[in-house]
Image (cartoon, grey):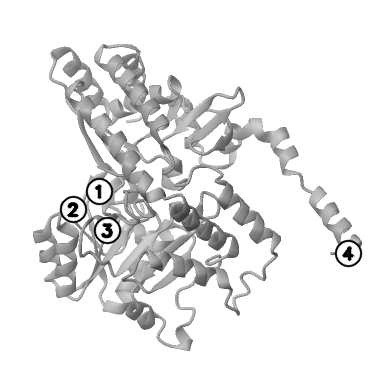
Amino acid sequence: MTTAESASESSQAGAFDLGALLAERGAERYELHTRYLNHQLPRMLHTIGFDKVYERAEGAYFYDADGNDYLDMLAGFGVMGLGRHHPVVRKALHDVLDAQLADLTRFDCQPLPGLLAEKLLAHSPHLDRVFFGNSGTEAVEGALKFARFVTGRPRILYCAHAFHGLTTGALSVNGESGFRDGFAPLLPDTAVPLGDLDALERELRKGDVAALIVEPIQGKGVLEAPPGYLRAAQDLLHRHKALLIADEVQTGLGRTGDFYGYQHEDGVEPDLVCVAKALSGGYVPVGATLGKDWIFKKVYSSMDRVLVHSASFGSNAQAMAAGLAVLSVMENEQIVAGVRATGEQLRSRLAALTDKYEMLADVRGRGLMIGIEFGRPKSLKLRSRWAMLQAARKGLFAQMVVVPLLQKHRILTQVSGDHMEVIKLIPPLIIGEREVDRFVDAFTAVMDDAHDGGLVWDFGKTLVKQAVANR
């Protein structure tokens, strides 16, 4: 670079100062969202006391301006698989920017997409090809399109309570009415109960089914497919010349203690697999649809069809570099083995509390995808309080637990779904014994307070009033 070029670049960089902008306007964050974005988000955060101001993040923790740490047991809905700002992923992104690659020319073949596809497929030995998009819902859209095209059939089956994304095709296979209401007409797809092979076969006999799309563990409620279901469903589908689509957007890349969730069951080899979230390293949106060779060759059957399914930002260099760095870290740091060990420790310690707390009904899940379900207590005093919450809105008790975990113990979690008494834990895959201890101690303290009739119930009254006002 010449002296003149260097001076020009410095001048251009000085024209925009991100640090100065954040220093000047960062305190307006909630006001800006209220005015220009989804105005209900800051309203909701203010209502439940989640309106924190986080200044920075590292690993499994956020930090506020006073240096207080907050344990992240949500991982950005699973995006932050390696935690925040992993140094290997950061370096890869600095490197790819500094390389000044001729990216997205559209009329060449850059090496990074091929290298990332090769790495992904090494973990998916029965699959052959990859399409890169920008998100989980886009990965699902690609799988739905491919399945319909190669089978020549219009209908996709999905499971009740499923979540596969919010774009129109993915929304058509969404098992929660709250997301679907008001967005009709959707595609003519059909729900079947998770685990019900008879219901699946009844639909397949109609002869118009292209595929079944299924999450090995459903994100809403942390509900796992029964043992043997995926293999039996696969056999039924293939017998009726339909495909199995595994949605691994949340369960994939080590979350459940195997690279994919479906790998917990022998003999399951989906025809199409959707991944996203953790593949991004928490930096650059990326999604991928993996499939068998014959499917891709039928979709892209001639040069005339070379762009029949494409994405403007798909396979961009930054996303590919992030994905390659993520897979490298997973291999070098033995992330999957760590998830198995830490997940079992966390799940077993929480499960041991079910005998202690009458409102703790179940602890389930695999790896670091754990559901904590609450249920109706036996004692009269607690039953009356439980009934008060349920009459106002199902799911309020779980919210009563989530809020003090953040406000009193600085731990971020989430209720697993609307009208559900379930908390879902999907922390960064890098947590260890320290974080397990902190969460179990905090959860125990909150449950002690709830069963003793403490301050948790005062907040419950606030939630009841808010639920009634919103009717």
For marks 2 and 1, give the one nearer the viewer: 2
* SS assignment at label 2: loop
Residue 334 appears in the picture as rendered: yes
Left or right? Give the position of 75 relative to 9: left
Q: Residue at x 55, y 54 (%)?
A: 284
Q: Residue at x 25, y 34 (%)?
A: 348
Mark number displayed over residue 80: none
Q: Name the amino acid, label 3.
A: Gln
The residue wearing badge 4 is 2
Label 4 Cα neighbours within 10 Å, binned few <14 / some 14-19 / many ≥20: few
The residue wearing badge 3 is 263
Taking 164 as reference, is 397 above or below it? above
CA distance for labels 3 and 2: 18 Å
Of the two numbered discs 3 and 2 on the same chain, state the one appearing first in sequence.
2
Q: Residue at x 49, y 72 (%)?
A: 310
Of the two numbered discs 1 and 4 on the same chain, state the one appearing first in sequence.
4
CA distance for labels 3 and 4: 54 Å
CA distance for labels 3 and 1: 22 Å
The residue wearing badge 2 is 194
